[in-house]
């Protein structure tokens, strides 16, 4: 019997790809975004529903029965009432609608994805509400959050050079007769066999994206750095060159450089927050230690008069790299950030597409798709690139989710062999790398 899954907050179908990699069948999907639904339908042959709040509530349950529930749900605040009311305390949030599906359909396993700080101090109460709610429905889930990023996963298990830490709440339904033997509060899943140690994280975007880059025949002009962007970067490149090959303590600092401090445009004010004062003092100290060199650079750059304020801020995170154009560059609202070209920062839903310094252009849609684990055959149709980048930024890492499920099955196999042996078999029979499975579809 085919294992069936539901896909809540489905986006363009990252979780659908995970389910298909295991050979499962989709019975329900939903997403509020019309353009994402269109891409989902184009690639997966299924029209998602529009709104989970109207499909799963106190009076309606349109989500059919299924074995696996996926939900990359939005992070919403929970009431901090302290009344320990579990699911009722989540009312008014989208997690409450997920909970109604779980309560009614009792899927064999759950895979919920969210931002990493869902389990952090600011959201601790919400995290506790989620755990209490799931256990109230009979699910075995760990207090310890599973936070994993695709760049931590080995290449041959679907890893990618993208630093995208996300929390995966993976849980298994335990029938009442088994709860004495298998308590609902348990240890986290073990992913050591598929993850890299810190010393092994030797990603290199020039190499790891190289095969994608070669397949891109026509690079759109919109991806290339324009004259203004190149001008800004070359000014900072000039400053970097003045510090290259000098003794270590004379390298560019790791804290953000605010050139307006050097120009006297930013000074410490009485009401400034501590963090701002700290940045200003650090910039002043660095200027005093390198005054001759910095003044010469400022003169040669016409005192940065043609640079917008945000481009007079520069953050160097590339250590002893010799050139900006050997690195990965981000033109952020808060300034220019340059880091080693080992792995990309997380794809985000807003326009901050990283720049490959050696190619002097932004990452292409094909490259960002690869970083998320999207299959080669995936088709975004004729929609605008801005919508596609946004959808990719809202998506999940297919490799990370795939391996989280394999780890869950490892932990709870004895339970699932009694409740859903077909689910266990499907995971065991699937390739260990989702890339291999998706190429067969």
Image (cartoon, rainbow, N blue to C red):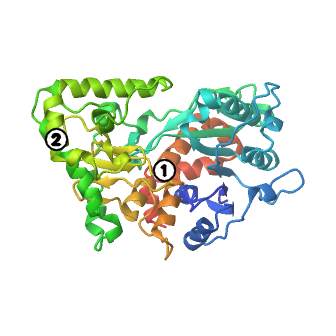
Give the alpha-carbon distance from disc 1 to disc 2, as whole Å: 43 Å
Examine the image and state in which quarter residue 411 appears: top right
Q: Check disc 1: other Cα within 10 Å, few if <14, some if 14-19, many if 20+.
A: many
Q: Using the image, tell me which numbered label, if any, was put on residue 371.
A: none
How many numbered marks does the figure carry? 2
Image height check: is 363 above or below 287? Answer: below
- The tag earlier along the polypeptide, 1 or 2, is 2
Q: Measured from the top left, where is residue 232 in percent x and y?
A: 26, 52
Q: Position of residue 111 (x, y in %)?
A: 62, 45
Bin the neighbour count of mark 2 within 10 Å (Cα to Cα): few under 14, some 14-19, many 20 and up.
some
Q: Is residue 212 visible?
A: yes
Q: Residue at x 71, y 35 (%)?
A: 130
Q: Image quadrant for the N terminus?
A: bottom right
Of the pair 86 and 123, the residue shown nearer to us: 123
Which disc number belongs to residue 297?
2
Percent from the top left, x then y, of residue 221?
32, 70
What residue is shown at x 71% (from left), y 26% (from top)?
A: 181
- Residue furthest bottom as drawn: 382
Q: What element carries label 1?
A: loop
Q: Which mark is residue 397?
A: 1
Which residue shows up at 40% across the image and 39% down it?
Answer: 152
Location of residue 424 with respect to 47 vertically, above or below: above
State the residue in front, 175 or 312.
312
141 displayed left or right of 285:
right
């Amino acid at each position: 019997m085919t294992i069936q899954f539901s896909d809540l907050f489905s986006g363009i179908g990252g979780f659908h790809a995970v389910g298909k990699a295991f050979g499962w069948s989709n019975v329900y999907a939903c997403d509020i975004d019309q353009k994402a639904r269109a891409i989902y339908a184009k690639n997966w042959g299924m029209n998602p529903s529009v709104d989970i709040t109207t499909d799963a509530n106190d009076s309606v349950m349109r989500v059919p029965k299924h074995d696996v529930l996926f939900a990359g749900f939005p992070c919403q605040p929970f009431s901090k009432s302290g009344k320990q009311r579990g699911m009722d305390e989540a009312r008014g949030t989208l997690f409450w609608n997920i909970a109604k599906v779980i309560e009614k359909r009792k899927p064999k396993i759950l895979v919920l994805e969210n931002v990493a700080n869902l389990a952090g101090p600011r959201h601790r109460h919400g995290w506790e509400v989620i755990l209490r709610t799931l256990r109230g429905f009979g699910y075995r889930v760990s207090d310890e959050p599973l936070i994993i990023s695709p760049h931590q996963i080995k290449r041959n298990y679907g890893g990618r050079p993208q630093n995208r830490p996300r929390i995966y709440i993976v849980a298994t339904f335990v029938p009442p007769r088994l709860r004495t033997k298998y308590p609902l509060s348990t240890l986290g899943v073990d992913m050591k066999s598929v993850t890299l140690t810190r010393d092994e994280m030797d990603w290199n975007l020039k190499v790891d994206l190289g095969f994608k880059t070669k397949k891109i025949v026509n690079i759109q002009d919109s991806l290339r750095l324009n004259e203004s962007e190149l001008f800004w970067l070359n000014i900072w490149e000039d400053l970097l060159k003045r510090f290259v090959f000098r003794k270590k303590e004379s390298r560019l600092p790791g804290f953000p450089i605010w050139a307006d401090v050097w120009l006297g445009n930013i000074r410490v004010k009485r009401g400034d927050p501590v963090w701002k004062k700290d940045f200003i003092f650090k910039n002043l100290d660095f200027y005093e230690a390198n005054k001759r060199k910095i003044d010469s650079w400022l003169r040669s750059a016409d005192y940065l008069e043609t640079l917008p304020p945000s481009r007079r801020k520069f953050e160097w995170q590339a250590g002893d790299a010799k050139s900006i154009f050997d690195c990965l560059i981000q033109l952020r609202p808060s300034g220019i950030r340059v880091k080693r070209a080992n792995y990309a920062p997380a794809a985000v839903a807003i326009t901050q597409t990283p720049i490959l310094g050696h190619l002097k252009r932004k990452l292409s849609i094909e490259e960002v798709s690869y970083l998320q684990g999207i299959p080669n055959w995936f088709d975004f149709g004729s929609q605008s690139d801005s919508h596609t980048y946004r959808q990719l930024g809202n998506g999940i890492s297919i490799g990370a989710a795939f391996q989280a499920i394999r780890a869950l099955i490892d932990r709870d196999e004895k339970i699932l062999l009694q409740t859903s042996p077909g689910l266990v078999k499907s995971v065991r029979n699937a390739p260990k790398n989702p890339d291999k499975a998706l190429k067969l579809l």
